[in-house]
Each structure stands twice: as C-alpha cells, then as structure tokens.
Image: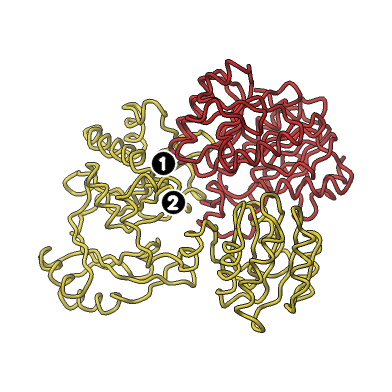
C-alpha cells in the first residue's frame, strides 16, 4: 500500500527524522494562507501516488501569491500524469507547501527487502535527486547496497561506512546514525516494504534533512496496523482493483484488449505471456485464488467485462480445489448481464470437473472457442486477431 | 539439507482441523503419504478421519509419533508461530503452505530455521511430491503426476501443475517436484533444489520455472556455472508481459529494476547452459529436445 509524501514525512517526524517545515492543504484558500506562513518563498508539491512529479510540473518554487494562485487553479481537483502513471492519470486533492531548503548536496537513501540475503537492505548513493535506476545502470559503483543484520540492526561501523561512501564529515555521524536507526525502526514497527528518501540533503546549516519521502507497506501486514490503514487514499487507486481485492481476487489492470481469468499467479503470468506472444496485449492480470465459489467467479468475470478495452476474454483454469463446473456457472451469471454484448470467449479448463464445466458453457449461446492446452490458446488468439 | 521424501517420511499436519488443512490432509493420505498426526492448539484428543490423533502441541505430537516432517496450513497471522513451534519440537523438514505471512516476520523465521539447520520449504508454496514413492506433502492434484526421472522446481503452484501435466501427457515421469513459493523470503531456494537434483541418482533432467521479481533466478544461474552439472535443464521464466512496479499476485513477483525482468533472468540461465522455454505451452517439447 502506498501513501502520500506528506503522510510519509509525518511518519518520519514521529521516528525522529528531520524533514522541512511544511503544511498540507486541500483548497486554494488554505494554500494561500499556508504560503503566507512561509513569508515570500515556498515550494509547492502536488500530492499523488506516483513519482516523476517534478518533471511534469507538479513541483514548483513560488515567490508571490499570483504564482500560488495559478498553481492552485492548475492542479486542485485536476487529473495529473507523470512518466510513472503512463496513460493513466491521478487526481490531485492535496498540495503540500514546504519551506525552501538551501541545498549543499543531494543523496539517496532507501530501505527495502532483499530476498537474496533474507534481510532488509540499506541502499545509499551520493547521486541523489535523480532516478536511482539510472544511476544503477550507468554508475553502479556509486551505489552501496548491504544487508542489515537481523539481530543487531544497523551498526556503528556500517553507519561509518555509509558516511564515508557519501563523503560526509565525521561530525555528521550522530545525525546520520539517528536517521538510519530511525528509518530501520520505522520499517520494522510499521511493516514497510519500502522507504525511499530521495533526496536526503545536506543544507547550508550542515543539517541532514529528508527532502522527499516515499513509503509503502507490506499488504500482508496491514491487519496489524490500523493507523497505517487510515492513511490509505483510495482516490489514488484503480477502482476495479479495489473491488476485486475486497473479494480476495488478485487483479491488476493493464492496457491490452484480452482480458484473462486464471487460477494461480504463476499460471496467470504465463497466460499473459501467451497472449503477448500471439501478438496481442493482456488487459489484466487476474488470479481468482483457490476454492472460489460461483459468486466470486461471477465477480471476477464481471470485473474483466467492466474494462471497456476488453475485446476477448480468455479463461485458463487448472482445477484442483477449484471445480470447473462451479466456475462455468459463475461465468454464466456474469455473462447473462451482458447478453449479446458479451465479448468472444476462449476457454481452457483442465482438472477437477473440467468436462462438466465445458458442457455447461457449450449449452449457452455465447461465442466460445475451447482450447485443450496453451498452444491451442495461442492458435485461437492468432486466428481472432 | 535433504529434500528426499518417501515411505520413511512421517508427517504431522499443523492446522489439520481447519477446512484447508483437513481437505488436503485427506488428499495426501489418499495419495499414500504417511500422515501420523495432526496438531491444533485446543483440539488435542480429537480424532481426524477416525484414524489420526490430533494433539495440542508439536512437542507432544513429535514425542508420540517420532515424525520428521511437518506440513503447515495455519492462517497467516499464526503461521510464523506454527513454524517456530515446529522448529523447536525438533522437526527437521517444515513445509509451509500458508500465503500472506508478513515479510518482516519471515526474515526472523528464516534466520531461526537456518540456525537450527531445518529445511523450510515455502511459505506460500504448493509443497513437494515424489510420485514413485507415493509421497505428497502439499496441495498439488496427485493424479497429474507420474513416476519418472525428471525433477521439477518452481516458484509457482498452478504453473507447476501445468508443467507436470505437459510432461505426463508426453510420457515423461517425475522424480521429485518442489514448489519453493512465491514470496520474497523463502526457506528453500532454487539453488538448494538444483543442488539436490544434480546429486540425485534418481534424477536425469530438470525443469526450472522462475518468474519476474528479485534475483533468485540469476543466483541459480551463478550456482549452475560454479558446479559441474551434466544434467540437461529446460528453463521457463514467466512475466515477460508484466509491467514494472506492479505486483503480479505473488508478493515476490514485482519488477523493480532491470534485474527483476524476465529477459535478464532468461539471459543468465541461458549463459549457465539452460535451454530456454520460449512459450509456456512448450515445456515438455523443449525438455524432449535436450534429454
């Protein structure tokens, strides 16, 4: 689960990590008032769950009320696109007003899980304020990445190593230690899946300050953290994804024309690959999960059908706990609402009660092609193109 | 670490009185697995399926049955404790089916399992199966497997079934199939299973199924380069069509950076001598070309 920058910074403050003075606003009047609090200069930042805001004009240094007024008119209640959102856009409901920092240097600092070391890793780079992926591919020697000991947490010698790597003065040791230990504590206590401070700056008073912050949380641990759940902004999330998640269906909307319904995440990805190798594009990832009943399967089909880009629906089920006859009845429940406007269907069913499942679908008037295996799915997709 | 499972494998099912645990325990018994006990705290003294004793704790179940393996179906909030209870009872192989265990908890559990030299498989995995010994410890549909000499290792459940179904329909039997799980932190990795297959006299060839996210496939490729392996390996990586930054169901299946992409994984495995399966429908066909 993602949260906004201003929420991330509030959490950082709670854990003792310095951030710039800032005020979050929800409308033009409060934005103008907040600007006055900072005197004659401030930075305005739109609050959306996407990176790349700066390059899209969503971050601006303002020096008079007219600029603030224009910024408010341009963004409040409007939809916003960045490199990361692609063709989608996200709604702007909040704008953060922040004091202007005098930056001496910009660095990168992040914590995330490393499956290879079975640990939480700290990643730092002296190249802050830029896309870290770009640094990783062009100047990998400018990135320091190491696992934190599960028992001890970040130790003093590791913090000295970071200090040295970032070319920071030894006088900054206790400030850096405070930040890194605070972040690690926050990561564990709130079950984060990523904390990214980009940039972490040194200002003209030689203070270390988190100028931007991105935090996301482990969805599987949210049940433990009501305070974090309260930070969720569903306006920033995909509507179909929200509805399906409530039913325990894993759905991710993509941009293609072939909707798919699959059981199992691995088989779902394989099915998307089959669609792509047939020259088409998947409209979604969808894993119904094990042991689904008619109702849940009907909802899964409805979710796929509700995507206006879907021209073909591909069902690929390997029945185990999931019974194919139950699935077929669920599909029909959803399809009946669409009647003649239902798209073409390609059905592959294998395993528990698959013959029964196919018979049930065969008895309907829907436009269905049956496939025995993944190869046949490819052939049918290529014919339908 | 040994992944050998056979008629000497005595299994305790943790969470046997639950819906999932009970259903799959029965399927394992039908397949021929020696399930010797069940554990559900507070339900000790009951009989499961009129034949299997249910105990309150792993300690008492282990003491009474001398089991060596446990299979966990406990819901995710309680699963980390169930794994720990298993480890401290002296069980040496723990298979955790449970999905959705918080990652930060698994980091600690992993360390404890490792320190106690326990073979942990999963979490969020389908388990493992040895068709020639009629031993299945997991949730896979038993009827698609057939005894033979190909080892299968995979991060996914249903995709393993897809692979095995193709193998069986092409007359290729399996020696051992292991689903290592789709989470970022898992006990047994590709490297552990590959190491086992390479040294296993019952295995002549390997099907390797990976997916986007993390770098476990690249580490497996490095391992293959470092050992003297003459057994043919057919490798499939799924998720080439997935966008960056979106979680594809499995908690571990999210691309962040180039190394998490399917292409980078395929290149690494190709360099390590694996035959790359270019279409998920060609798993058996690709293997047939190299064995």
* Relative height, residue B182 to residue A171 (above, below): below
Q: Residues within 10 Å of mark 1 (few under 14, many from 20)?
A: some
Write the residue at 65% across / 22% down. B1
Q: Earlier in the sequence, mark 2 or mark 1?
A: 1
Do the numbered discs 2 and 1 sit on residues whose CB atoms are within 8 Å?
A: yes
Quadrant in the rendering for residue A301: bottom right
Q: Nearer the viewer, residue B177 or B37?
A: B37
* Secondary element type, mark 1: strand
Quadrant the C terminus of chain A occupies: bottom right
Give x and y (percent) for residue A108: 36, 47
Relative side of A363 to A28, left or right: right
Q: The residue marked by circle 2 belongs to what chain?
A: A
Q: Nearer the viewer, residue A358 or A98?
A: A358
Whole-angstrom CA distance, mark 2 to mark 1, is 10 Å
* Secondary element type, mark 2: helix
Q: Which chain is yellow?
A: A
Disc sitting over residue A132 in the figure:
2
Indicate the colour of chain B: red
* Relative height, residue A72 to residue A18 (above, below): below
Give x and y (percent) for residue A184: 34, 37
To which residue does mark 1 refer?
A: A123
Q: The residue marked by circle 1 belongs to what chain?
A: A
């Amino acid at each position: 689960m993602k949260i906004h920058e201003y929420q991330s910074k509030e959490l950082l403050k709670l854990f003792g990590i310095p951030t710039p003075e800032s005020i979050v606003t929800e409308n033009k009047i409060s934005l103008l008032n907040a600007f006055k609090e900072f005197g004659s200069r401030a930075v305005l930042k739109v609050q959306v769950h996407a990176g790349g805001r700066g390059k899209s004009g969503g971050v601006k240094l303002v020096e008079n009320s007219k600029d603030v007024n224009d910024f408010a008119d341009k963004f409040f209640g409007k939809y916003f696109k960045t490199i990361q959102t692609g063709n989608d856009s996200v709604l702007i409901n909040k704008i953060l007003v922040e004091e202007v920092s005098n930056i001496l240097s910009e660095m990168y600092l992040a914590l995330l899980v490393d499956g290879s070391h079975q640990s939480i890793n700290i990643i730092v780079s002296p190249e802050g304020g830029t896309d870290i992926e770009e640094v990783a591919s062009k100047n990998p020697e400018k990135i320091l990445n190491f696992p934190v000991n599960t028992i001890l947490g970040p130790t003093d010698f590791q913090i000295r190593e970071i200090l040295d790597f970032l070319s920071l003065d030894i006088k900054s040791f206790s400030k850096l230690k405070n930040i890194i230990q605070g972040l690690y504590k926050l990561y564990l206590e709130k079950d984060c899946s990523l904390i990214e401070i980009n940039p972490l700056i040194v200002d003209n008073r030689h203070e270390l300050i988190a100028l931007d912050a991105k935090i996301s949380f482990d969805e599987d641990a949210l049940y433990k953290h009501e305070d974090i759940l309260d930070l969720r902004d569903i306006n920033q999330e995909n509507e179909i994804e929200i509805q399906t998640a409530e039913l325990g269906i894993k759905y991710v909307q993509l941009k293609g024309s072939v909707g798919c319904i699959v059981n199992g995440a691995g088989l779902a990805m394989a099915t998307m690959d089959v669609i792509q190798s047939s020259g088409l594009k998947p409209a979604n990832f969808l894993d119904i999960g094990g042991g689904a009943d008619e109702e849940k399967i009907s909802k899964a089909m409805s979710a796929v059908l509700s995507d206006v880009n879907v021209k073909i629906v591909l069902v690929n089920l390997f029945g185990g706990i999931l019974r194919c006859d139950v699935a077929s009845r669920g599909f029909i429940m959803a399809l009946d609402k669409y009647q003649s406007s239902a798209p073409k269907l390609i059905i592959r069913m294998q395993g528990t009660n698959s013959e029964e499942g196919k018979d049930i679908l065969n008895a309907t008037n829907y436009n269905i092609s049956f496939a025995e295996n993944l190869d046949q799915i490819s052939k049918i997709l290529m014919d339908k193109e | 670490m040994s992944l050998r499972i056979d008629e000497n494998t005595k299994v305790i099912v943790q969470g046997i009185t639950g819906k999932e645990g009970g259903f799959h325990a029965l399927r394992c018994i039908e397949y021929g697995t020696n399930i010797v006990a069940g554990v559900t705290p507070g339900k000790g003294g009951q009989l499961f399926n009129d034949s299997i004793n249910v105990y309150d704790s792993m300690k008492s179940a282990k003491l009474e049955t001398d089991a060596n393996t446990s299979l966990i179906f406990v819901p995710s909030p309680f699963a980390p404790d169930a794994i720990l209870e298993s480890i401290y009872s002296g069980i040496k192989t723990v298979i955790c089916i449970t999905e959705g265990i918080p990652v930060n908890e698994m980091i600690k559990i992993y360390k404890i399992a490792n320190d106690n030299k326990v073979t942990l498989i999963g979490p969020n995995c389908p388990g493992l199966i040895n068709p020639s010994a009629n031993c299945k410890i997991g949730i896979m549909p038993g009827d698609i497997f057939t005894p033979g000499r190909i080892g299968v290792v995979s991060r996914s459940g249903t995709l393993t079934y897809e692979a095995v179904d193709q193998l069986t329909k092409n007359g290729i039997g399996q020696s051992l199939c292991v689903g290592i799980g789709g989470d970022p932190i898992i006990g047994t990795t590709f490297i552990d299973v590959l190491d086992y297959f390479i040294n296993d006299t019952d295995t002549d060839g390997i099907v390797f199924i990976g997916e986007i996210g993390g770098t476990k496939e690249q580490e497996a490729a490095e391992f293959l380069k470092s050992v003297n392996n003459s057994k043919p390996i057919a490798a499939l990586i799924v998720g080439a069509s997935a966008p960056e930054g979106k979680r594809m169901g499995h908690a571990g299946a999210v691309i962040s950076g180039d190394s998490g992409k399917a292409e980078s994984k395929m290149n690494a495995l190709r360099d390590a001598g694996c035959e790359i399966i270019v279409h998920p429908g060609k798993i058996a066909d690709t293997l047939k070309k190299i064995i």
